[in-house]
Amino acid sequence: MSRIRIIGGDWRSRLIDVSTVKGLRPTPDRVRETLFNWLGQDLDGKICLDLFAGSGALGFEAASRGAEKVTMIEQDAVAFAALQHNVKTLNASRVQLLRGDALKFARSAIQSCDVVFLDPPYRAGWIERMAPFLPDLLAANGVLYVEAEYEIENIDRLTRIKQGKAGQVYYHLFAPAA
């Protein structure tokens, strides 16, 4: 088990446990700092969804910054157990954990979210499979954050509004198309 630091909000500098599941890559500090500068430091009242939660770095950052509700979806049992431990350690009452398939969840989700985080395992085609369902997960003024091993120029019914690259990580922010 390794640990990463929450970089902002109420839990700033707190460490969370991260499982050592093969292929798990927590979003780097530098990328999280940029993302939350884009989103604004205060997420009070926002409804957030962290698909493929993995380490939970993005979801816990959102909760730390005041999100009203953060739902984290994770299928791997070891990663899910680490998320459960972190929820208890942080007393994260606004975080809801669901163990299951992110694609099935996206297909059936009924609540619109202000912020959706999508950081799936690399080289597995998840972004392409998730793409048709992503716009329907967003509230009218919602945004979608996508992290990938390649640059993403387009997702149907969404407009890319910001992008960046750090090392091998490409990160993007999308909003509903006008």
Image (tube, rainbow, N blue to C red):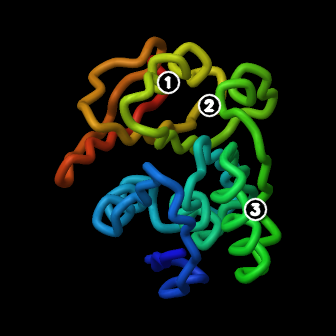
Which amino acid type corresponds to the residue marked 1 in the rendered image? Pro
- In primary-sequence order, the first of circles 3 and 1 is 3
Residue 101 appears in which quarter of the rendering? top right
Comparing marks 3 and 1, which lies closer to the viewer?
Answer: 3
Circle 1 residue? 176
Secondary structure category for the residue under label 2: strand
Query: Mark 2: few, some, or many residues within 10 Å (few <14, many ≥20)?
Result: many
Q: Which residue corresponds to the image point at 76% horizontal and 67% vertical from the top-left?
A: 84
Query: Mark 1: few, some, or many residues within 10 Å (few <14, many ≥20)?
Result: many
Which amino acid type corresponds to the residue marked 2 in the rendered image? Leu
- In primary-sequence order, the first of circles 1 and 2 is 2
Q: Which residue corresponds to the image point at 48% horizontal and 14% vertical from the top-left?
A: 157
Q: Which residue corresponds to the image point at 33% horizontal and 18% vertical from the top-left?
A: 154
Which amino acid type corresponds to the residue marked 3 in the rendered image? Val
* Foreground pick, 104 / 108: 104
- In primary-sequence order, the first of circles 2 and 3 is 3
Instruction: Give coordinates of residue 82: x percent, y percent.
Output: 67, 67
* Foreground pick, 111 / 81: 81
Instruction: Give coordinates of residue 110: x percent, y percent.
Output: 81, 27
Left or right of 12 on screen, residue 108: right
Circle 3 residue? 95
* Foreground pick, 169 / 8: 169
Left or right of 160 on screen, residue 138: right
Spatial separation of the CA atoms under disc 3 and disc 1: 25 Å
Check whether the beta carbons of the residues at disc 1 and disc 2 lie within 8 A of each other: yes
Left or right of 8 on screen, residue 114: right
Disc number placed over residue 138 in the picture, else none:
2
In the rendered image, the quadrant that contains the C terminus is: top left
- In this picture, is 37 found above or below 23? below
Secondary structure category for the residue under label 3: strand
